[in-house]
Amino acid sequence: MVLFETDFILISGRIQILQTGKEINELDQSGFSTQGPTIFAGNLGHNKYILQVTQMGVRLLQGSEQVQHIPLDLGSPLIHASAADPHVVILTEDGQLILLTLREIKPSVSRLTVQRPTNFSLVRCIFITVTDIFKVLS
């Protein structure tokens, strides 16, 4: 019985992408960003896609192939992300929140949409559920 299975290991300190299988091999070519630290990596779309969040943007991959790149130039680097499939909430250093949602655009093809959230209850629930980053202060 397999409890956890992964195809890739991202080593952010050395910016290295490893592919797992019978052996672990370093990937020289992939859709992953290796130009800076990875803030968050996780799965979306019931494990069909891999999400990589860096300080300057988001990449959506299927296997090692990039299917979408969203640069996020918000005037402040991205510092934290949290996901609850199909939603991803991203926090910038100056406190801006961005909500990404994985949406199916045609059968078996999904893409991330970007919005600035107006329903902060949803955003707060995603963060509290996954990271407990927001605390209610009395």
Image (spheres, grey):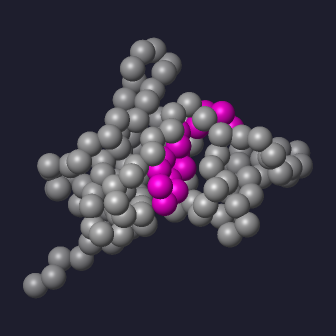
Residue 123: quadrant of the picture: bottom left
Residue located at (61% from left, 61% from top): 36
Residue at the outermost top position: 107
**Residue 7 locus on image (x, y percent):** 71, 45
User: Is most of the magenta stretch helix, strand or loop?
Assistant: strand
Residue located at (81% from left, 46% from top): 28
In the figure, is residue 80 to the left or right of 19? Answer: left
Residue at the outermost right position: 23
**Residue 9 locus on image (x, y percent):** 71, 55
Relative height, residue 49 to residue 82 (above, below): above
Residue located at (38% from left, 40% from top): 86
Asked if residue 59 lies in the magenta stretch, the reply is yes
Asked if residue 107 lies in the magenta stretch, the reply is no
Note whether residue 132 is visible: no
In the figure, is residue 63 to the left or right of 83? Answer: right
State which quarter of the image contains the C terminus.
bottom left
In the figure, is residue 39 to the left or right of 138? Answer: right
Q: Which residues are magenta?
A: 51-65
Note whether residue 68 is visible: yes
**Residue 100 locus on image (x, y percent):** 35, 43
Residue at the outermost bottom position: 138
Relative height, residue 45 to residue 123 (above, below): above
Relative height, residue 31 to residue 4 (above, below): above
**Residue 53 locus on image (x, y percent):** 50, 53
Residue located at (80% from left, 46% from top): 27
Residue 121: quadrant of the picture: bottom left
Q: How many marks?
A: 0
**Front-most of residues 35 and 44:** 35
